[in-house]
Image (cartoon, rainbow, N blue to C red):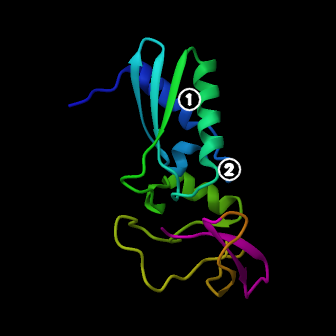
């Protein structure tokens, strides 16, 4: 069994507080892409990071930002390793991340789900983050980032991003 040291926990909190470059309302911890931190020596650390999808262009920025904050916190060597298995899923977004998405006008994945541990429903009603209506329409399968779709509420007519389920 691997035990986590107090320093690893502090460094994880520091790295986890880094904002996502494409969704700065969320931290990397809230997005669920920060998989772990391991001390390799007194001032050397390895960070495991899983992108939201294999071709995610933000992984380089995430890596640079994590390296910068950990070097600023006394580490002399920071290695960020991309981990593709297990694959990231929208189930990895924390409850706080889900809340922040909705508060910022982005419909979170699987809105209103009480239990996010089960399978993704085949018929998904996307709730408008502005008025709460489920009468929404898809405008584009891709939005400002590949992990979001552009939708519009038929009731209030406001466009909004929807974080797609993966």
Front residue of this view, candidates 127 and 38: 38
Residue that badge 2 annotates = 25
In the figure, is residue 156 to the left or right of 52? right
Q: What's the CA distance linking mark 2 and mark 1? A: 16 Å
Q: Is residue 44 above or below residue 110?
A: above
Residue sitting at x 61%, y 41%:
62
Q: Residue furthest front?
A: 55
- Classed neighbour count for the residue bearing mark 1: other residues with Cα under 10 Å, few (<14), some (14–19), many (≥20): some
- Classed neighbour count for the residue bearing mark 2: other residues with Cα under 10 Å, few (<14), some (14–19), many (≥20): some
Q: Residue furthest left?
A: 1
Question: Element type at marker 1?
Answer: helix
Front residue of this view, candidates 34 and 10: 34
Front residue of this view, candidates 28 and 45: 45
Residue that badge 1 annotates = 14
Q: Is residue 92 above or below residue 39?
A: below
Q: Earlier in the sequence, mark 2 or mark 1?
A: 1
Instruction: Report the disc number at residue 63.
Output: none
Residue sitting at x 48%, y 31%:
12
The residue stretch that appears in magenta = 146-166
Q: Quadrant of residue 125?
A: bottom right
Q: Is residue 67 above or below residue 111?
A: above
Does the segment drawn in magenta span residue 148? yes
Q: Quadrant of the N terminus?
A: top left
Q: Quadrant of residue 61?
A: top right
Q: Position of residue 90 (x, y in %)?
A: 48, 62
């Amino acid at each position: 069994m691997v035990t986590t040291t107090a320093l690893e926990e502090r460094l994880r909190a520091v790295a986890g507080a880094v904002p996502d470059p494409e969704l700065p309302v969320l931290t990397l911890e809230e997005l669920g892409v920060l998989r772990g931190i391991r001390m390799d020596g007194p001032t050397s650390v390895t960070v495991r990071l899983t992108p939201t999808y294999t071709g995610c262009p933000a992984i380089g920025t995430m890596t640079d930002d994590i390296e910068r904050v950990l070097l600023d916190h006394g580490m002399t060597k920071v290695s960020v390793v991309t981990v593709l298995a297990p694959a990231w899923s929208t189930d990895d977004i924390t409850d706080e991340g889900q809340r922040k998405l909705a508060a910022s006008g982005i419909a979170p994945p699987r809105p209103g789900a009480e239990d996010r541990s089960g399978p993704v429903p085949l018929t998904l009603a996307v709730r408008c983050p502005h008025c709460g209506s489920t009468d929404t329409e898809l405008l584009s399968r891709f939005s400002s980032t590949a992990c979001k779709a552009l939708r519009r509420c038929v009731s209030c007519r406001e466009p909004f991003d929807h974080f797609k389920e993966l």
